Amino acid sequence: MGIVPYQIPPRRNARRQASTELLSEWLALYHRDARVFHNLRLGPAPAVPRGFVPSPEIERMLKRRNRYADAVVVTPAELLVVEAKMDPSSAAIGQVLDYADLVTSSPELAPYASLQIVPVVLWPADDPIAHRRAAALGVRVEIYTPSWYEEWLREGYWRMQSTRQSRRAIARGAGTPSPDGSPA
């Protein structure tokens, strides 16, 4: 019997991203009984011009532009601010540090103010350079490799790379490359 994924609330987009699946499985294995906030918008409403006092309706609309963490996990001692990425990179580190800074100004998380805030990046594979950078900046690195990772590498990752390659080729005016990467 395989892992029963943690139930992440469905989004409007029915197609779930691989990073969402990664997060779902990790939560099911390691934080099944924890209180979890998914895609929680963090911080106050974005800045508005000086002297402008937005109505509650405008403030709600502005908050839709806030940053959001993939998950905020409440454990007995910590508040884990999680950013999951299929491609380990330093960019995720900057994102999760931003999110961790915004936790204290998020009203939904006020009941957990006494907990230690821990920024966490979740990757399916390790990148030694990004891992060292994360550790130096106080970001916890969690590595969880799902059973479907190899398939994702074969199908999803290379499809994503060929799409990027196609866009670059079209931008250069070279046309769409063939499946083997050579210009068509």
Image (cartoon, rainbow, N blue to C red):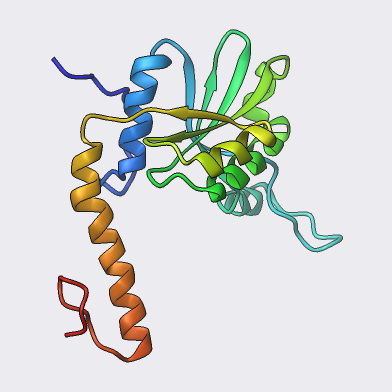
Position in image of residue 112 (x %, y %): 66, 17
In depth, the one of 159 and 47 nearer the eye is: 159
Residue 139 in percent (x, y) is at: 62, 32
Taking the image as shown, residue 79 lies to the left or right of residue 162, namely: right
Q: Position of residue 161 (x, y in %)?
A: 30, 63
Indicate whether 29 appears above or below 178. Answer: above
The quadrant where residue 42 appears: top right
Determine whether, in the image, residue 160 is placed left or right of residue 115: left
Quarter of the image for residue 158 reads: bottom left
Front residue of 45 and 15: 15
User: Which residue is farthest bottom?
Assistant: 173
**Quadrant (top left/top right/bottom left/bottom right) for the N terminus:** top left
Give the residue at the far right of this rendering. Answer: 51
For image coordinates 55% across by 50% down, the residue present is: 91
- From what the image shows, is residue 3 above or below residue 150? above
**As rendered, which of 11 and 51 lies closer to the eye?**
11
Residue at the front extreme of this rendering: 128
Residue 42 visible to an observer of this rendering: no
Give left or right: position of 21 versus 138.
left
Number of numbered discs? 0
Up/down of 5 relative to 18, above or below: above
Pick the front one: 135 or 46? 135
Question: Residue at horizontal 29%, vertical 60%?
Answer: 160
Q: Quadrant of residue 24?
A: top left
Figure check: 55 above or below 27: below
Residue at image coords 28%, 43%: 16
Q: Could you say where residue 175 lies in the image, as x and y percent from the top left?
A: 24, 87
The quarter of the image holding the C terminus is: bottom left
